[in-house]
Amino acid sequence: MAADKQAADKKTKRRQLLRWLAGALLVIGIALISTRPLTDQVIKHNEQKALSSLTVKKIKKNQTKKGQFDFSKVKSMDPAKAVKSRVQEVSAIGAMAVPSVKLYLPVCRGLSDANMATGGCTMRADQVMGTGNYPLAGHYMTAKGALFSPLEQVKIGDKVYLTDLQHVYTYRIYMKRVVDPSSVWLVNNTTDKIVTLITCADGGANRWAIRGNLIKTASASSKNLKVFKLHG
């Protein structure tokens, strides 16, 4: 009797293990099929969470953080990085909008993985909105994906808006070109008041470089902040 019971228990455990393995393989298969949509979904959640929780107090606190500004340490986005970013701290210091291509993102201080999985990231420690060259880097995901992907569709004359919740800065795009990855001059400061937006092109072999001139600075108000869609 005892032997029969042990044999039955072994068969039951074997069946349970096989069912568990089958379920695990199914989950893995679904994940492999849908990794890009999943990654975009997580990133969209990060974007909206950072935008909706943005305050002047939080911006001032994040502006004092050291940040990571070594662009060589930035790696391509993948599902693991996207999921991990949900529990990492994001240093949001403002918001950006390019309404012509429906881009609405937080601006983050530095190029950490969490920041790069959330919005447009500053590339120098001394950047000040509305002053000199204000370069921002962002990941290109897919043709209609999250983060800086929509910038591929911008046109000369389109407007870029930045805010630190105290002022709203309006820029008009005057340059859009593909450059090689060694074009570090794009990050250097300038006497001209411009914004520079950088993302991948040609599958990562090159970079899109987009620049706009500052054409207007205004105090932030409930009216002009609507362009950033801070609350969805």
Image (cartoon, rainbow, N blue to C red):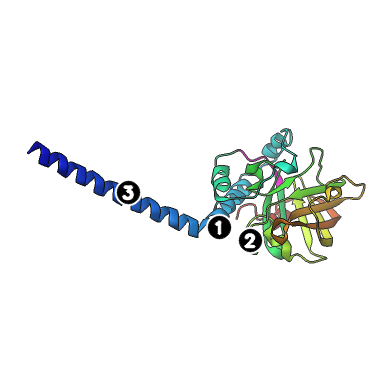
Q: Identify the residue under disc 1.
A: 36
Instruction: Say if the magenta span includes residue 143.
Output: no
Label tally: 3
**Looking at the image, is mark 2 or mark 3 nearer the viewer?**
3
Q: Amino acid at mark 2?
A: Thr
Q: Identify the residue under disc 2.
A: 142
Q: Identify the residue under disc 3.
A: 20
Q: Is residue 133 visible?
A: yes
Residue 74, placed above or below residue 231:
above
Q: Amino acid at mark 1?
A: Arg
Q: In the picture provided, is 30 more to the left or to the right than 12?
A: right
The reply to whether discs 2 and 1 touch (Cβ–Cβ < 8 Å) is yes
For the point 80% across and 57% down, the residue is 209
Q: Amino acid at mark 3?
A: Trp
**Looking at the image, is mark 3 or mark 1 nearer the viewer?**
3
- On the rendered image, what quadrant is the C terminus found in? bottom right
Q: Is residue 109 visible?
A: no
| Distance between mark 2 and mark 3 Cα atoms | 34 Å
State the extent of the magenta-drawn residues as a range: 89-94
Point out residue 107 in the picture as x, y percentages from the top left corner. Answer: 71, 47
Instruction: Say if the magenta span includes residue 91.
Output: yes
For the point 65% across and 64% down, the residue is 143
Quarter where residue 97 is shown: bottom right
